[in-house]
Amino acid sequence: MIRRREFITLLGGAAVAWPLAARAQHSERIHKIGVIMGLRARDAEALLRVRAFESSWRELGWVEGRNIRVDYRWAPGDSGVFRALAAELVAAAPQVILAGGTPVLAAVREATQSIPIVFVGVSDPEGSGVVESLSRPGGNITGFANFEPPTGGKWLQVLKEAAPNVTRVGFLRQPGTLVRFMRTIETVAPSFGMEAVECKASNAVEIERAIDTLAGTPNIGLIILPDPVFAASRRLIIELAAKHRIPAVYPFRFFADDGGLLSYGVDVPDQMRRAAFYIDRILKGEKPGDLPVQAPTKYELVINLKTAKALGLDIPATVLARAQEVIE
């Protein structure tokens, strides 16, 4: 039996300990992460990427609102919008920034040379000068590349296999980006019996003008290069391709999900999930420049048979057999 004096002493000690424990719990540092993506906030693909990104946090010991806070910015616009949002995000002083897409990364790099940056969805980061090398990026940047220039040849191949009558191929590119992809497509196209035609576009108006211009060319096909502006305008691009009956190849599966003929590209949500592990390592003290840029772990060929039938295309069985998914 505890005597009254001992009980009071014990109770007093507990009373001192409780506030200290409470203060320790509430004083746990909250780490701030900034995320900027070239999609609309309610875009189905945006939601998929967020779920993939956040799926790893609890496994890594991070809980939103307790020891981590993520500030999302969505920028389905042109480079001016990207720059404005990047500057706004940097002003909020996050400890790490996750940047999605080449033009988004360019805007973030312009806004800061000190805050660590992890990128996803960036093509040819070494060739474009984003990093010094893939194995030792250097500086404040690392991340997950999505495509290298030889992929341009693969897009040409699957387009020719799906639509053998194509003799000219337009490739939609934002000016000043993906130069080595452009050269690859122009160089490789003749080996598939095609002539490559560059189509420059930086916004929805220019996209519509470019595709409408292509439509007057017989036996034309289309390749959409990876770019957040094109991802945000994908429904417009898909509708224009259908309207003009142009067979088109897209870089990501969400284009095929939304009605595009076929896509050949990387699993971006998987890269978002993997990016969480890099951010965790940076928050725990590692330098981004010491973390190697990661290459894609898998590519997906997705074919929309409904769209193929609408275009009057009979996709060969050999191509269907290679697809990871066929949408009927």
Image: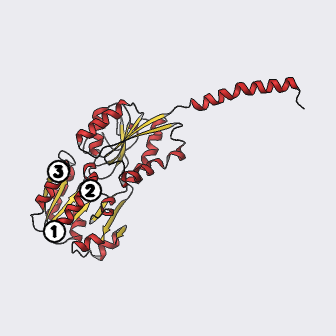
Q: Marks 3 and 2: CB-CB under 8 Å?
A: no
Of residues 101 and 278, the one nearer the viewer is 101
Disc 3 secondary structure class: helix
Q: CA distance from mark 3 to mark 2?
A: 13 Å
Whether residue 217 can be seen here: yes
- Which one is earlier in the sequence, the residue at label 2 or at label 1? 1
Q: Amino acid at mark 2?
A: Arg
Of residues 175 and 127, the one nearer the viewer is 175
Residue pointed to by mark 1:
166
Disc 1 secondary structure class: loop
Tell me if mark 2 has few (under 14), some (14-19) or many (20+) residues whose alpha carbon lies within 10 angstroms of its own.
many
- Which one is earlier in the sequence, the residue at label 3 or at label 2? 3
Of residues 259 and 180, the one nearer the viewer is 259
Q: CA distance from mark 1 to mark 3?
A: 26 Å
Residue at (69%, 29%) from the top-left corner?
18
Horizontal side, residue 65 vs residue 205: left or right:
right
Residue pointed to by mark 2:
234
Q: Amino acid at mark 3?
A: Val
| Residue 205 tag number | 3
| Quadrant in which the C terminus is drawn | bottom left
| Residue 300 tag number | none
**Front position among marks 1 and 3:** 3
Horizontal side, residue 14 vs residue 112: left or right:
right
Disc 2 secondary structure class: helix
The image position of residue 257, as x and y in percent, is 33, 63
Asked where in the image residue 70 lies, by quadrant, the reply is: top left
The image position of residue 318, as x and y in percent, is 30, 74
Residue at (41%, 36%) from the top-left corner?
96
Whether residue 152 can be seen here: no
Residue at (45%, 37%) from the top-left corner?
282
